[in-house]
Amino acid sequence: MSTSAVRHLTTRVPRRLFISADMEGIAGVASVSQLMPGQFEYETARIWMTAEVSAAAQAALEAGYDEVIVADGHGNAQNLLPDRLPPGTTLIRSWPRPLGQVEWADMPGVEACMFIGFHSGARSGAGTLAHTLNGTLFADVRLNGQSCSEAMLLGAFAGEIGVPVILISGDDAICGEVASLMPGIVTCPVKTFIGWQSVATALPQDAAAMVGAASARAVGQDRPAPFRLPAPYRLEVEFTHPVIAELAGLLPGFRQITQASVAAELPTMRAVLHMLGFLGSYPKGG
């Protein structure tokens, strides 16, 4: 057997864990004024977000994972502070990217996903800073008639590729929703919903410790079954302005179903995420 053949046989695919990170569900974050560069407390909120993600990543690395892939999924996707993440982390930053908030979740060796800092969907009826993907553009996103949170959409993609979601952190509203959808998932509520722009929150340093402990528990127990939604998918997007729906209705495969909504039939969750990424980014480019 040649040397190259031996090398091929002995090459081990790294064990990887994937983290999708958002900001609205991070402890201490309560209002839109904290969410974007140049606004009140944004720079501080970045530190809080990085601390929670770092705690989750560190727990996975200490449990034996070779690499943790982190996709920054909030705003401009350049919120996490790279030099505050643990060695062994790969950080996905900026837009656009084909799979959005789960870019690189399909890398070889990814065994499980975690969702850190997540929030409820636009039509959830509860949840601080609730929206779905792009709150200024999308009034609702529905799959097969059901309104979706980002956790539901991303979790369904992970399930499509055979990867379970083992942990979610955020407020109690999204943690409760996801626990009912994905039995066996570890939930880590770091704050309690009061209103759309108000919460009772753990202190950031306590929340990071809570996320670290919950992550250690999640990677240390048997993984739950991947979450799956039956294909094909009827994707309906309700926009915040009728003109956007009129334009989206011109896309091949789409039709306008109400003044502000369009619908299309798509075969896979990958196709769903590709289309939502396009609708959410075009024409501004990111």
Image: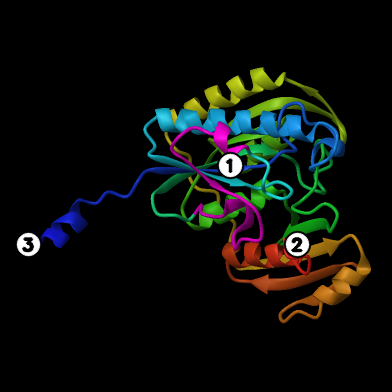
Q: Which mark is residue 1?
A: 3
Label 2–label 1 contact, CB within 8 A? no
Asked whether, in this view, residue 227 is left or right of residue 24, the answer is left
21 or 194: nearer the viewer: 21
**Foreground tag (2 vs 1):** 2
Distance between mark 2 and mark 1 Cα atoms: 26 Å
Other residues around mark 1 within 10 Å, as few (<14) / some (14–19) / many (≥20): many
Whichever of callouts 3 and 1 sits on the residue coming sooner in the sequence is 3
The answer, for residue 151, to whether it is visible in the render is yes
Asked whether, in this view, residue 181 is left or right of residue 246, the answer is left
Q: Residue at x 70, y 46 (%)?
A: 74
Distance between mark 2 and mark 3 Cα atoms: 52 Å
Q: Which residues are magenta?
A: 81-105
The answer to if 190 sits in the magenta stretch is no
**Quadrant of image for the N terminus:** bottom left
Q: Amino acid at mark 3?
A: Met
Whichever of callouts 2 and 1 sits on the residue coming sooner in the sequence is 1
Magenta span: chief secondary structure: loop
Q: Residue at x 74, y 63 (%)?
A: 281
Residue 219 % position (x, y): 45, 32
The answer, for residue 218, to whether it is visible in the render is no
The answer to whether 9 is drawn above or below residue 185 in the figure is below
Q: Which residue is mark 1?
A: 182
Residue 81 % position (x, y): 62, 37
Using the rendered view, name the quadrant where residue 117 is placed: top right
The answer to if 103 sits in the magenta stretch is yes
Residue 122 % position (x, y): 81, 48
Other residues around mark 2 within 10 Å, as few (<14) / some (14–19) / many (≥20): some
Using the rendered view, name the quadrant where residue 61 is placed: top left
Q: Which residue is mark 2?
A: 280
Asked whether, in this view, residue 108 is left or right of residue 28, the answer is left
Label 2–label 3 contact, CB within 8 A? no
